[in-house]
Amino acid sequence: MRLGLHALGIGAGAQRSVIDAVAVAAESNGFATLWSGEHVVMVDRSASRYPYADDGRIAVPAVADWLDPMIGLSFAAAATHTIGLATGVLLLPEHNPVLMAKQAATLDRLSGGRLTLGVGIGWSKEEFDALGIPFARRGERTAEYVAAMRTLWRDDVASFDGDFVRFDSVRVNPKPPRERRLPVVLGGNSDAALRRVAEWGDGWYGFNLDNVDAVAERVRTLHRLCGDVGRDPGALRLAVALREADPADVGALTGVGIDELVLVESPPEDPDAAAEWVGALARRWMPAVG
């Protein structure tokens, strides 16, 4: 079991000094991954239902600073040497896939092969409307974008002809340093999200799940869906964040096949306090993960 930290990019975690302090402290205290999520647009009153809260509302206030995760993680990469970096999650259908393939490969190259691209299809229609991107078929768009990006990473001269993206005989460099491939994990807790993981993902980032029992039920569903498409679920990277995690949960999570438990926390604004805050998290959690 690895321990991840989802604390950068929002509020106090959007300050450069706090990013540096948290990233360095997380690496020195044995955390495996720094996660950072994305919303390009927030609205004061949303008609769209947030799927990770019982009341359907996101807890982050619309006025909060929220960094672009690719840029924020590049600062975390520059402050560290070995800790993994992950978008958790990037809303891929809101981006140009050719440009995102370039940006992701660039960050992966500069960080020494430390990036995991966590992607989601999005839930806020208002956000898609503001960006001028159709909300309908966003799941299909995401799958095609990933396929196109993998083609760009793999091939020296790449061509792709799909419903949402087309290019012919183009070169996009640099290539990701790990065999021209970058791990793509998918967010989302629904059956549809898990079906995407089974069909074409490299892993799953389950977010804000109620408890270990909820995780176990979702993992069983993922295994069934993998069986439907002939995939080995053991080849997938599984990371989850719980609403209220406890170190006592680690053994049970390991038993159902979870590779990484992600702590979703907000750092203090003072960078000196932020470093100690990470240390306190490590002292509480590291004995449980071993």
Image (cartoon, rainbow, N blue to C red):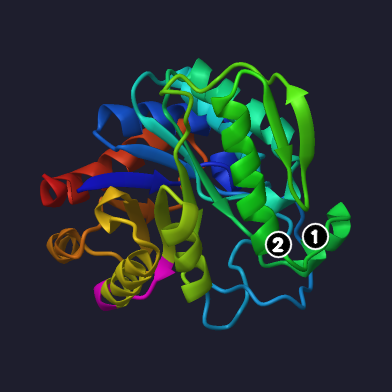
Q: Which residue is mark 2?
A: 138
For the C terminus, give its image quadrant: top left
Q: Residue at x 41, y 23 (%)?
A: 178
Query: Height in image: 65 above or below 84?
Result: below
Q: Front-most of 195 and 190?
A: 195
Q: Residue at x 29, y 57 (%)?
A: 233
Q: Which residues are magenta?
A: 208-213
Q: Which residue is mark 1?
A: 128
Task: Nearest to the eye among marks 2 and 1: give it.
Answer: 2
Query: Height in image: 187 above or below 273?
Result: below
* Residue 209 included in the magenta stretch of the image: yes
Would residue 30 be visible to someone looking at this image? Answer: yes
Asked where in the image residue 104 lies, by quadrant, the reply is top right
- Considering every residue shown, the one lying at the far bottom of the view is 55
* Residue 221 included in the magenta stretch of the image: no
Residue 5 position within the rendered picture, expressed as x and y whole percent measured from the top left:
38, 45
Check contact, mark 2 vs mark 1: CB within 8 A: yes
Question: What amino acid type should be assigned to the residue bearing mark 1?
Answer: Phe
Residue 232 position within the rendered picture, expressed as x and y whole percent measured from the top left:
28, 55
Q: Is residue 197 left or right of residue 251?
A: right
